[in-house]
Amino acid sequence: MRAISVPRLARQHQRRLVFAVFGFVSSAVSVGVIALAASFTHQPLVFPSLGPTAFLIFDRPRVTAAAPRNIVAGHVIGVLAGVGSLAAFGLLGETAPAGDITTTRVLAAALSLGLTVGAMVLLRVPHAPAAATTLIVSLGYLRRTVDLAALLGAVVALAVQGILIDRIVGIDYPLWASPRPPVQPPG
């Protein structure tokens, strides 16, 4: 028997409050662990798109976009599209602009977002927060290979924590991919 079962608590108490407390605690703990690792390693492990990813894991665990497969693949696509777009416009290695964003940078950002969304749709791995990741990369905020590897490491760490935390408290969170919904016949 589990010491804490969020679904059982939700049946016995106010459902919204139970899940709100769970979301608060699980998100704070998981991102807190990653932030602590960032402080020790001096790597950019905490970045804006990690927040919406945590929200999906802990508030919408059965949504396809929250599955670990979609989380990891989506952010990998975002990083690759961002780097590819920077390369396409000759911006690899350049720092993010302090003031005005150049036309070339705008084009790289637009291309990276288009590539990210298109690839996620094509590969059936939707994960909206990855669209923010690709902009972080294509706008030049993270540009070193070690920073991009750290970013992806944080994504994997968050997905693993999601699996552990959700399953420990009795939430049915997939180990890799969400089960496919049954195909509905036309009409």
Image: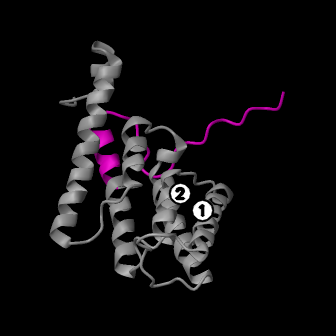
Q: Residue 108 at x, y = what percent?
A: 59, 72
What main secondary structure does the magenta stretch of the protein show? Answer: loop
The way the protein has been coloured in the rendering is one colour
Pointers 2 and 1 in contact (C-beta within 8 Å) = yes
Label 1 is placed on what type of residue?
Answer: Leu
Q: In this view, does 20 lie above or below 146?
A: above
| Crowdedness near tag 1: few (<14), some (14–19) or many (≥20) residues, C-alpha within 10 Å | many
* Residue 63 visible within the image: yes
Instruction: Say which quadrant the C terminus sits in.
Output: top right
Q: In this view, does 58 lie to the left or right of 113?
A: left
In the displayed structure, 1 sits above or below 180; it is above
> Dot 2: few (<14), some (14–19), or many (≥20) neighbours within 10 Å?
many
**What separation in Å lies between label 2 and label 1 (alpha carbons)?**
6 Å
Q: Is mark 1 on a helix, strand or loop?
A: helix
Q: Is there any visible trace of residue 169 in the rendered image?
A: no
State the residue lying farthest toward the left: 40
In the image, is residue 55 part of the stretch drawn in magenta? no
Expressed as whole percent of the image width and height from the top left, the position of residue 26 reads 26, 41
In the image, 114 versus 11, the foreground residue is 114
Q: Mark 2 points at which residue?
A: 131
Q: Which mark is residue 113?
A: 1
Type of amino acid under label 2: Ala
Disc 2 secondary structure class: helix
Task: Locate residue 110, reporting x and y percent.
Answer: 62, 65
Magenta residues (range): 160-187
146 shown above or below 39: below
